[in-house]
Amino acid sequence: MTECLDSRDPKRYERTKLWIGLANLAIYIFAPAIILVTGASASIRDIISDEITSIVVLGAVAYIVFASIALELVTLPIGYFSGHVLERRYGLTRRSVRGWTLDWLKGLAVQTVMLAVFVACLYALLAADPKYWWVWASLLFSAISVFIAAIAPVVLMPIFFKFEPLPDGELKDRLMRRSKQLGTFVQGAYVWKLGDKTVKANAALAGWGRTRRIIISDTLIESHDPDEIEVIIAHELGHHVNGDIWRGIAVQVVVIFVSMWVINLALGAWSGAFGLDGTLHDYANMPLLALITTFVGVIALPLINTYSRRRETAADDFAIDTTDMRAEFISAMEKLAKQNLSNAEPHPLIETVLHSHPSVSRRIARAKG
């Protein structure tokens, strides 16, 4: 497997992933635009209202369930190529076709349920308070995002991956001692069974409050020594000590408020166009909401990633300063880049727009001083 990784080009892998991402983005823009402009969305609403339910919230849920499944089926070939064919070509996946399909079905189910809850809340607020719905929606969705961050390691991630307590021993003792020294409570340390599906490695401090836990992929444990793992976890602990979790939530809240505000303006301007009935809670306007959300996301992405890279750099500095493991940090970065087939020197524009972390070459150069 190592020989396979060594023989592949990280830059070519990154370029292919980029083109796949652009293809997906195009579909997520043109599909709702076509459905909206042609009046197909209004026709779908009429069918749901006549044949299934005339209750707005239930109709909106039926619409999003249908739309979510349909869009996932449209993008299925791209998803399969990106998630399985390409990963196998570069020697990164250990999943069978059956395994990939099962994960795809799980992802579709989780996504559809979450979208159904989101849409039910949204259209209930649109119907209840057409003037200030966007304020209440922003507050509600911000609270939901915090809740999801808390339950992710205990509810969502186990749907896709197995987790086991990190066995007692030197590594566990070092990580728990380090977290205690830094005043960061963790519920425990767990082995993330990532190796069942990929050769890539990862680690994180997931959750918050009583659900906060250290998770380390088995692939990271196999490829890195305890010093390297400790400095990686010190980086993750640095995010919590530096308040980056709450900073990130604050940024997310701002994006949610801006998105809801822009959607409110758009619905006010176009609620009578494209066959829409003129009311804000006409769920035929869902493609319009999707388009606006996509455009706000695209505009915000480079700003969010620029901020994220600054916080990642601060966490790198924190890890090196608190552990005094500069050489170990550098070797850990080099190993991770090779194992995950990361492009150590991406184009500056690609890094600015798409990368939430500084490039490996920048991180190593800074560590060397």
Image: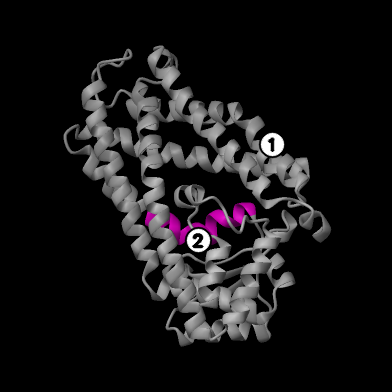
Q: At which x and y percent is residue 91? A: 77, 51
Q: Is residue 272 above or below residue 144?
A: above
Q: Which residue is mark 1?
A: 81
Circle 2: element type: loop
Q: At which x and y percent is residue 34? A: 44, 18
- Using the numbered discs, state the Cα–Cα distance from disc 2 to disc 1 in whole angstroms: 27 Å
Q: Is residue 31 left or right of residue 73?
A: left
The answer to whether the residue labelled 2 contacts the one labelled 1, judged by CB atoms less than 8 Å apart, is no
The residue drawn where x is 60% and y is 85% is: 174
Instruction: Please state, as top left, top right, bottom left or bottom right, where the N terminus lies in the image.
Output: bottom right
Q: Which of the pair 350/158 is nearer the observer?
A: 350
Magenta span has 158? yes
Q: Is residue 283 above or below residue 17?
A: above
Amino acid under label 2? Pro
Residue segment shown in magenta: 145-160
Q: Which of the pair 166/287 is nearer the observer?
A: 287
Q: At which x and y percent is residue 25? A: 50, 33
The residue drawn where x is 45% and y is 75% is: 238
Q: Which residue is mark 2?
A: 358
Q: Is residue 218 above or below residue 15?
A: below
